[in-house]
Image (cartoon, helix red, strand yellow):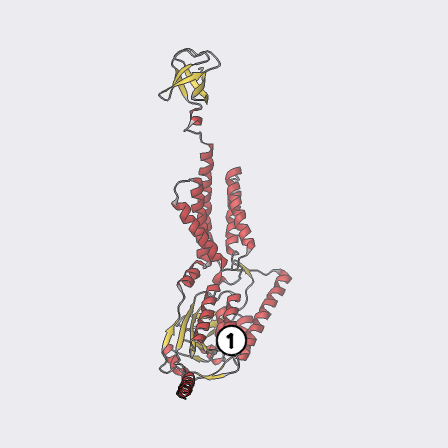
Amino acid sequence: MSHKITLLLLVCFGGMAAVVPAEGKIVRIDLNGAIDPITSEFVIKSIEKAESQTADILLIRVSTPGGFAISMEEIITKMLGSKVPIVVYVTPSGAKAASAGFFILLAADVAAMAPGTNTGAAHPLMAIGGFPVEGGEAGKTLTQKITSNAMAYLRSIAGKRNRNVTEAEKGVLDSKSFTDTEALEKNLIDLVARDETELLNRLNGFKVRMFSGEERSLKTQGQPIEDYVMTARQKFLSTISQPNLALLLGVAGLILLYFEFTHPGFVAPGVIGGICLLMSILGFSFLPINYVGVLLILLAIGLFVAEVKVQGFGVLGFGGIVAMVIGALILIDTPDPAVQISISTALAVVLPFALIFILLLIALLKSLKQKVTTGDAGMIGLIGLSVNEIHKSGRVKVRGEYWSAQSSSLIAEGRPVRVVGIENLTLMVEEVRE
């Protein structure tokens, strides 16, 4: 009987413990810089962690010029399915949520901006290396399709969030930017808050409708704030996956490896070059690569080699520079300048690379043409003196050393001789006639 009572008490108290609500908290992350695959992974993992910890709010502080459309869509998909209300706050003053950031701002359960910030400018670009391309009728048709798709995607988000769809479309169709005041007046955002303290105070009791249709009343008063930050791995990958840095690492790695191959024995350039090249490849592996850009860079290297080999009077070398610059500019397969290799970086990297590569190649070819000065082969062509009369065999003095020698013709004692061969430590010589 006592066992049954004990079991009943455990069930009762266990049930009571199960219904006690877990202590809530506010989770905060920063979304700064270009939106790329590493940023997407960080935001998605943060949402999942906030859900597992039953956080009351996930606050995303945003300052971004834009980024990759695929990464943006991954973030928005996770945001729309989140069980935790998400507040996107464009901050600090002077920051912006442009291009892909505009979509993310409108997809939030609560969209907020600090004074002096702006958002919008989300028109899809058709460009090569940041330069607009008309592309004729086919190009215009493709641009229209991309723009139409982006507008439909934005309408589905803004409409569900009860935001001004017409004004939101202007951010895509006309690439219009909105100040914080304009965005609030046109019902693109929910509020403008001077700082984070004011934001959280105004959010206390703020009612939101989740994308699933569920209504929530936010609680921020007295809630602890926990910051989620990138792991060491994510920080490292985020750094080396920056297009400009990845290009710099790749070029530096190629130069150092080439120097090691042409000057074996230094070791350090080979080790450092290998590490730089592998880090560059790792960084580019997270980015969408345009293989035409890769082929142009390989063509450029071939033109540099041809310039030295066939002496193209600078034409081939100049062509290699042009090919490498264009290849670098279109290497990242996206029209958004925020995540492209800039033309200034391309020129700053390509011109020194071309110069160093050509100089090293010239030095290598000169070294291959130089006469061997060591070993048996280094004896060929040396001038010596016959020690005695050489008739088929005798002795000579070469380089201060006495050698057995053979000659096909008679050489008198004391005559200058030239080494024409060597066999089993016996020199083959001929008389040097004046």
Residue drawn at 41 percent across, 47 percent down: 271
Instruction: List x then y, in percent, for residue 206.
Output: 44, 84
Q: Nearer the viewer, residue 380 or 252?
A: 380
For label 1, the residue is 80
- Side of 152 where 228 appears, left or right: left
* On-image quarter of the C terminus: top left
> Which residue is depicted at the point 46% across and 15% down?
407
| Quadrant including the N terminus | bottom left
Residue 348 falls left or right of residue 175 = left
Q: Secondary structure at mark 1?
A: helix
**Image location of residue 12, percent across then percent down:** 42, 87
Q: Is residue 65 visible?
A: no
Position of residue 193 relative to residue 407, above or below, is: below
Identify whether 79 is placed above or below 364.
Answer: below
Residue 135 visible? The answer is yes
Considering depth in this image, is 21 or 181 the residue closer to the camera? 21
Inspect the image, locate mark 1, and give the three-letter code of the amino acid beneath it.
Leu
Q: Is residue 405 above or below residue 29?
A: above
- Count of numbered labels shown in the rendering: 1
Most extreme residue toward the right is 137
- Image coordinates for residue 246, horizontal then vertical, percent: 45, 56
Q: Height in image: 198 above or below 371?
A: below
Q: Position of residue 190 (x, y in %)?
A: 46, 80
